[in-house]
Image (cartoon, grey):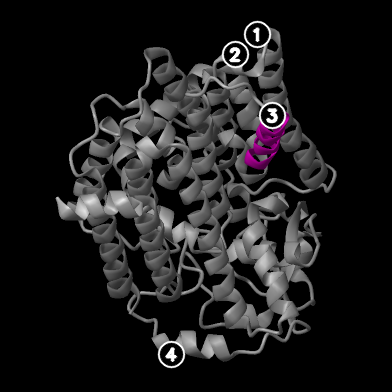
Amino acid sequence: MKLERRLESFGAEKIFVALFLFFGAAICFMRPPYQLMDEINHLPRVWQISQGIFFSPTMELGEFVKGDHRSKKIFSLTPTADAQSNRVNVAEMPASLLPEAFITDANHKHYVHAFDAADVKNFLATPLNPEDCDVVLIPNTGVYLPPAYFPQALTAWLGRLLNLTAGEIFYAMGLSGLMFAAACLWLAMKFLPEAKTLIFVLAMTPMFLLEAASTSADCVTFGVCLAATAWLLSLRLSAEKFSRAEIFALIILSAVIACAKSVYGTILLLYFLIPPERVGSLKKFLLTGAALVAVNLLVSIVWTELAVNAAGVELYTNRYLGYTTTDAAAQKVFVAEHPEKFFAAMANSLKLAWLWYAMNFVGAWGTLHQVLLPVAFYISYAMTLLAFAVTCGVRVRPVERLVLLTAALVSTTAFFLVHYLKWSAVGGDVVSGVQGRYFVPLGLMIFVALSTFKPMPHKNSIALVAGTVSGCVMLAANFYAFY
């Protein structure tokens, strides 16, 4: 097949990254601002980090609601009486970055055939006016670590330095996130070339592309986890001794994963697939592994202590939205006394919502996930992912499959537990708030664990077609939803 030969000779990964960048840039400009879940809460955090404010300021929720300072309500809050005494994270944002035309209320106002390309043109021409600021609440993103927004925050800082307009800075932030994700995609395919088609097809899911081209922290999380998984899997295939630089890089990776999102620290378990002789003695191998886990946990614990406990803020829960059945402290006691009830709730949620998790994994967006793709696409792309998984060409031993699936299961249990504590009724039989996109950073681990057969013929050509179709369907769905 001529196309396959040309892809091989030119370097399929180059075409794959170029296609990823093309569709990512297209969705960056086509999608109305703040039309991803929680995206409108990420931008203020990016902005304050770009100003060197790493620890988000706090304010009494009651003071914010009743105060006479200039504030902007960017999402609905109906706090309970006791929640009003809690401190929450806030940020000051240039009003130009939050124009009224783009502000959405997830429960009442979101775009449905109402967006106009002229809005983008006007946004691009709007001066920044950094002195004209609003105060906004960021209770769910104010505790995120600064490195989780590195590309976007750096771009915001450069945008102010270059005196760009509000719209130029906003879209430049999205493009910088896209470039970061593309770099991670490139690294992942270079680290694990035998699985490059699987990696590409995974990255071309609309969900991955949408988050990559946004101001959301998921851009960094998705990219880092993809590259980290591929690198750790590749390290097990060599017999060369580790250099000090590689050991140092592993430690840095451990900290970076904690900064991106600590719940995905189980990716570090893939270190134990590396032959111990590569590190040295078995003792040195185990000590290094323990150090990686310790660094990851230490970064998370120290940051939580400084940004949450020392700041006196309460982690964002359903109680801020008026749901009195949610009580994290009482739920902790319940789980400690009845752990089997939590696991039953987790299993029940997976049983009831597995189809929605799968759809959200592939792609569903909007402030309430109201933009869906054709059913035929979900089915065909899921089958394509599975086909590339079982034929990805990575040789996996039974013990390695077990480690991969165990690591994914531990992370899954962790984010179900977090949401059971924060978002679910005390003692409830389902876990509320879990979204399918949470599984995306675990995708490569799960799919490589399924590797069974030799690579399919013409795999690069098929992956190229699948990625192109995915990008086109995503843009078409976005157009019909918002324009």
Mark 2 is on which residue type? Pro
Mark 2 in CB contact with mark 1 (< 8 angstroms): yes
Work out whether residue 84 can be spotted.
Answer: yes
- Name the residue: 64% across, 83% down: 96
Q: Is residue 88 left or right of residue 316?
A: right
Question: Residue 10, image x and y in percent?
Answer: 33, 55
The C terminus - image quarter: bottom left
Q: CA distance from mark 3 to mark 2?
A: 13 Å
Query: Which residue corresponds to mark 3?
Result: 247
Determine whether 60 is above or below 440 in the image.
Answer: below
Element under disc 3: helix
Q: Please tell me whether residue 2 belongs to the stretch shown in magenta.
A: no
Determine whether 439 is above or below 133 in the image.
Answer: above
Sequence order check: which comes first, mark 2 or mark 1?
Answer: 2
Q: Which stretch appears magenta?
A: 244-257
Sequence order check: which comes first, mark 4 or mark 3?
Answer: 4
- Name the residue: 72% across, 86% down: 129
Mark 3 in CB contact with mark 2 (< 8 angstroms): no
Element under disc 2: helix
Query: Which residue corresponds to mark 1?
Result: 282
Where residue 399 sits, quadrant-wise, is top left
Work out whether residue 363 can be spotted.
Answer: no
Query: Which residue corresponds to mark 2?
Result: 276
Query: Which residue corresponds to mark 4?
Result: 118
Q: Is residue 343 left or right of residue 54?
A: left
Question: Residue 99, image x and y in percent?
Answer: 58, 82
Sequence order check: which comes first, mark 3 or mark 1?
Answer: 3
